Amino acid sequence: HISLPSLRSLSLHNCSELESEVGFIEGEDGSLPSTLQELWIDEIARLMHWGLDKLPSLSVLRLQDNQDVESFPGKILLPSSLTEIHINHLGNIKSLDYEGLQHLTCLQTLEIRNCPKLERIPEEGLPSTLSLLSINDCPLLEKRCEREGGEDWPKISHIPEILFDDEAMMYSVLQALRELS
């Protein structure tokens, strides 16, 4: 066990056998430290039992390169403190789950990249707190979200900034550059 009570940012990459955080980083109750603000999860299949909802300081979640996710967040409970969610290369994701998103009252940014099977925005829409929706390389979703005639446009038209493809790619590049500084 490693005790990291002041940990603020954690990136986990290529840990396909990792089943939960218990056992490798120990917080007060054997879970991730409550001080964690940013979590990047790359190629980790089993996210259900992570207890992310018990991370009151978590503001940024990045989920990437996971072929097992068909719905997000699905049964994964997320903390209401999240301000940004970035999902990328979820090759089999087909839907966003309103039930799992509705309680995210601080969510401002939702970035969706390279999710070719993602079909639609939930019927109930996205959290009203969103100020930025970025969609890139999600052809089915992009078609439904088109400003003129897209079936899902009424569900997202309240969001002040909506970026598609080239604009969305530029946003991602700028985010990466900010993280370097």
Image (cartoon, helix red, strand yellow):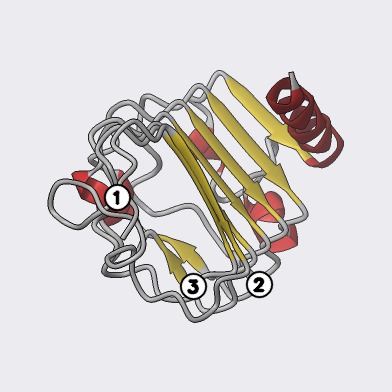
Q: Is residue 62 visible?
A: no
Coordinates of residue 6 in the picture (x, y in percent): 34, 30
Q: Position of residue 42 (x, y in %)?
A: 59, 61
Identify which residue is drawn at 33% across, 63% down: 21
Name the image quarter holding residue 114. bottom right
Residue 70 location, x and y as percent? 48, 74
Which residue sits furthest left? 29
What amino acid is labelled 3 in the image?
Val
Q: Which mark is residue 91?
A: 2
Q: Nearer the viewer, residue 70 or 81?
A: 81
Choose the circle earlier in sequence order: 1 or 3.
1
- Eyeballing the image, is 94 above or below 123? below
Q: Residue furthest right?
A: 166
Which three-letter amino acid code belongs to the residue tagged 1? Leu
Q: Quadrant of residue 33?
A: top left
Q: Which residue carries the number 3 mark? A: 69
The crowd level at tag 3 (other Cα within 10 Å; few <14, some 14-19, many 20+) is some
Q: Is residue 153 left or right of residue 60?
A: right
Separation of disc 3 and disc 2 at Cα?
8 Å
